[in-house]
Image (cartoon, helix red, strand yellow):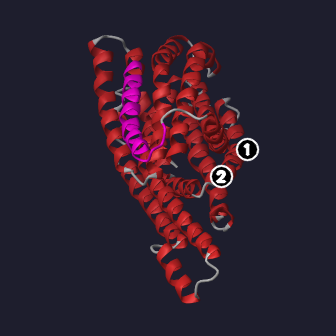
């Protein structure tokens, strides 16, 4: 497992270097393709150019976090994420206001924080690898294996990015006020999503451990045909001690939905004042408040969706998640494009258009994700 983890981090570093270089070179073209012009486009390009150097570090952070989760260590990623966020805020403030770099300083501060987080997460994995006698240099076979096993999840992640990019494009097309309001709602939605995703991480670790334990018990039983029935029963009971897979799934679903309800209620209650923490523009606040209520109403559904994602990831069901991710784009992307182009009735105004967009994203897109993952989770194919 550590050998695969080390190779996975090397692969992440290589992908991060390539992605960062391509994004930096294509920043002006991509910004124009998103429909941004004038000061908005200039700010976007400046941010991308200064934040791209942080992509290799961010890719390594994602890979290293996966390795530590596989070791059932969620404490270290938590500490590093919290420290990284604090560092990001501090460096951003210094570069934005102290050095007068503006939004470019924000990108540079994020890149610095991401690189520091990567170094902090790599250190304990290096120590684990040395303790287990695992070499730290990359293996070509391991890189290919990591790429092969990670490709389905890469496709799944790209499908999520397509949906998010389509949403940003539609918000941009609706005008600057809608774009600003969307940024506020999106920031609060992502904050809630990361909280809900913590439960998905727990489900991923618990399900993966339970399935591995059950598989090892089955393999051991098949190799011990000469032992007595009583001995086999005793050993298998010990190997599968703890919650059953069905019990883990049921309990985690309750936690996911319940946490979504709790966060949704808090977000709805604060819909009137939360936007003021981001902007003093009356027009943006007027559009943000009702849109935030729409987002809050869908958080219980989001809690279940993220939880089921974690369950299937823990089971290594990447191929299904990749296919399901592509399927979920079918009902949503055309709808987002119609809203952004003003073809939907009532979508011309800033408020009504953004509300429609978030109904489509928070309910249509998330419902499609929920349906595909629930249909899979209720069966047993993902357990083998």
Q: Position of residue 83 (x, y in %)?
A: 30, 36
In reply to whether residue 239 is colored magenta, the answer given is: no
Taking depth in this image into account, of 278 and 177 the one nearest to the observer is 278
Check whether the beta carbons of the residues at disc 2 and disc 1 lie within 8 A of each other. Answer: yes
| Residue 317 x, y percent position in the rendering | 64, 55
Nearer to me, 46 or 263: 46
Dot 2 corresponds to which residue?
Answer: 368
Residue 346 shows up from this direction: no
- Residue plotted at (67% across, 56% down): 372
In the figure, residue 120 lies in which quadrant? top left
Q: Earlier in the sequence, mark 2 or mark 1?
A: 1
**Residue 328 visible in this rendered orientation of the protein:** yes
Magenta-colored segment: predominant secondary structure: helix
As drawn, is 16 to the left or to the right of 184?
right
Element type where label 2 sits in the image: helix
Residue at the location (41% across, 36% down)?
122
Stretch of the chain drawn in magenta: 108-135
Find disc 1 in the rendering and name its residue: 330
């Amino acid at each position: 497992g550590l050998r695969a983890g080390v190779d996975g981090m090397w692969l992440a570093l290589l992908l991060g270097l390539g992605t960062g270089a391509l994004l930096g070179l294509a920043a002006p073209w991509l910004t124009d393709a998103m429909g941004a012009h004038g000061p908005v486009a200039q700010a976007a390009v400046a941010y991308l150019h200064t934040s791209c150097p942080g992509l290799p570090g961010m890719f390594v952070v994602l890979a290293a976090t996966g390795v530590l989760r596989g070791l059932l260590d969620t404490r270290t990623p938590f500490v590093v994420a919290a420290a990284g966020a604090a560092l990001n805020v501090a460096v951003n403030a210094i570069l934005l206001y102290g050095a007068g770099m503006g939004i470019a300083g924000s990108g540079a501060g994020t890149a610095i924080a991401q690189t520091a987080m990567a170094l902090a997460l790599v250190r304990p994995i290096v120590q684990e690898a040395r303790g287990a006698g695992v070499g730290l240099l990359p293996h070509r076979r391991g890189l290919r294996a990591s790429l092969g096993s990670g490709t389905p999840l890469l496709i799944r992640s790209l499908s999520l990015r397509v949906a998010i990019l389509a949403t940003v494009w539609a918000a941009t097309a609706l005008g600057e006020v809608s774009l600003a309001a969307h940024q506020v709602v999106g920031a609060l939605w992502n904050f809630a999503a990361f909280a809900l995703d913590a439960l998905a991480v727990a489900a991923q670790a618990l399900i993966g451990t339970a399935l591995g334990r059950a598989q090892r018990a089955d393999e051991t039983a098949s190799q011990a045909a000469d032992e007595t029935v009583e001995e086999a029963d005793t050993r298998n009971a010990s190997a599968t001690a703890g919650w059953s897979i069905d019990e883990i799934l049921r309990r985690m679903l309750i936690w996911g939905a319940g946490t979504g309800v709790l966060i949704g209620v808090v977000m709805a209650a604060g819909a009137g004042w939360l936007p003021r923490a981001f902007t003093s523009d009356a027009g943006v606040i007027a559009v943000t408040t009702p849109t935030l209520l729409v987002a809050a109403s869908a958080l219980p559904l989001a809690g279940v969706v993220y939880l089921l994602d974690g369950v299937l990831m823990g089971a290594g069901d990447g191929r299904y998640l990749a296919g399901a991710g592509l399927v979920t784009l079918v009902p949503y992307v055309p709808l987002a494009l119609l809203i952004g182009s003003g073809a939907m009735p009532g979508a011309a105004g800033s408020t009504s258009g953004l509300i429609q967009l978030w109904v489509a994203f928070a309910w249509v897109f998330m419902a499609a994700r929920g349906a595909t993952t629930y249909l899979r989770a209720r069966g047993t194919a993902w357990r083998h």
